[in-house]
Image (cartoon, helix red, strand yellow):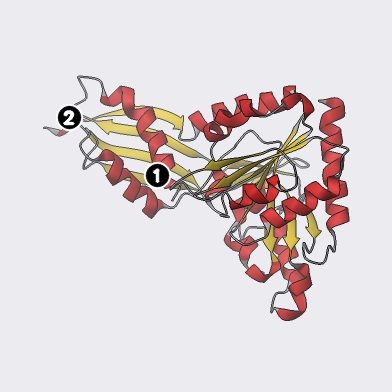
Amino acid sequence: MHEMSLMAGVFDIMEDILNQDEVQAVKQVRLVVGEMTNAEPEALQMAFAAYAKDTKAEGAVLEIVRAPVLARCRACRQEFPVSGLFFFCPHCGQSGLEIIQGEELLLESLEVE
Amino acid sequence: MPEENLREIKVMANLLGANDVQAEVNRNHFKQKKCLAVNLIGSPGAGKTSLLEKTLTGLGTEFGTAVIEGDMFTSRDAERIAALNIPVLQINTGSACHLDSKMVNKILPAFAWDTLDVMIIENVGNLVCPADFDLGEDFKAVVLSIAEGDDKPEKYPVIFRNAKVAVLNKIDLEPFTEVDLAKMKAQITAIHPEIKIFEVSCRTGQGLAEWTAWLAGEIRAVKETG
């Protein structure tokens, strides 16, 4: 359940925004969670509800956008989605891949009123 | 409240930002002290502490070694390492299922760094959560006992993708299990083609010399070049 730790990160980042007088309530929180992370959406929802209680974010919708794994081949420079946990370039067969998407854990945006 | 009062605030901030910043501080510390730092990760019972005992003994006196033990409640593992006369400190994480960079940073001042060449940080037994938390280590090492089953790399790909080396322990149990070792290794390689794989048995000693020699090479590389 390291989702509690991750959610602590979300509320640390949001703290300054929640403290602003002109922000009355947070209606939506949008996270981007890469497929190559171990954050479980359901556990994040539970952690969010726990942290949001008695704050301006209580009752807000937590939207979780899953980011699929994209890689770039260091040999031929092509970019492609990694499917089936097979980290070889489908174009040239090389293994030297750079993951360019799918490892992120981001607080993307908030909707407030 | 009417709809038009709704407004969007773009944030784009990393949830692990605070952990990652602290991890960089730790990394600089290890680098300055020319000390290799290894984050040892594996499920409960994979044999992390047994591997540590064998590895520390196998490394002999060439290097200054020390250990940080992560455990939710007990200090049993730290006691096993202390019995080898190796400096060791325990971090009890309480309810947390992983170590984070702040917990590690807090106890760094307690070690005699000028005498150390390698710091092994044994994480809480768990293949999931520790994989997401950078401690500032040079690399992650994953320990998997073959009896856990050949489907485990596929089920826990993040740690196998993020580790530099995988140690397959309890290799002596192969005749007594249904595990398909070739399949296990093929899965690991598909997820991380560059990963180093060692097959060892902490019970019989099989493969430990090769693993220890590889690790000694990694320690020397950091010690000599910084």
C-beta proximity under 8 Å, tags 1 and 2: no
Q: Secondary structure at mark 1?
A: helix
Q: Who's the residue at 20% across and 31% down the image?
A: A25
Q: Is residue B177 visible?
A: yes
Residue B144 as seen in the image, left or right of residue A64: right
Q: CA distance from mark 1 to mark 2?
A: 33 Å
Q: Secondary structure at mark 2?
A: helix
User: Disc 2 residue type?
Assistant: Glu
Q: Is residue A102 visible?
A: no
Q: Which residue is mark 1?
A: A4
Query: In the rendering, which numbered label is found on residue B58?
Result: none
Seen in the picture, residue A91 relative to B46 is either above or below; the reply is: above
Outermost residue on the top side: it is A21
Residue A112, horizontal then vertical, whole percent: 24, 30
Residue A43 as seen in the image, left or right of residue A34: left
Dot in front, 1 or 2: 1
Q: Which quadrant holds residue A83? A: bottom right
Residue A111, horizontal then vertical, whole percent: 28, 33
Residue B32, horizontal then vertical, whole percent: 73, 22
Protein chain holding label 1: A
Protein chain holding label 2: B
Residue count near mark 1 (Cα–Cα under 10 Å), binned few <14, some 14–19, many ≥20:
some
User: Disc 1 residue type?
Assistant: Met
Q: Which quadrant holds residue A96? A: top right
Seen in the picture, residue B200 relative to B37 is either above or below; the reply is: below
Q: Which residue is mark 2?
A: B4
* Quadrant in which the C terminus of chain B appears: top right
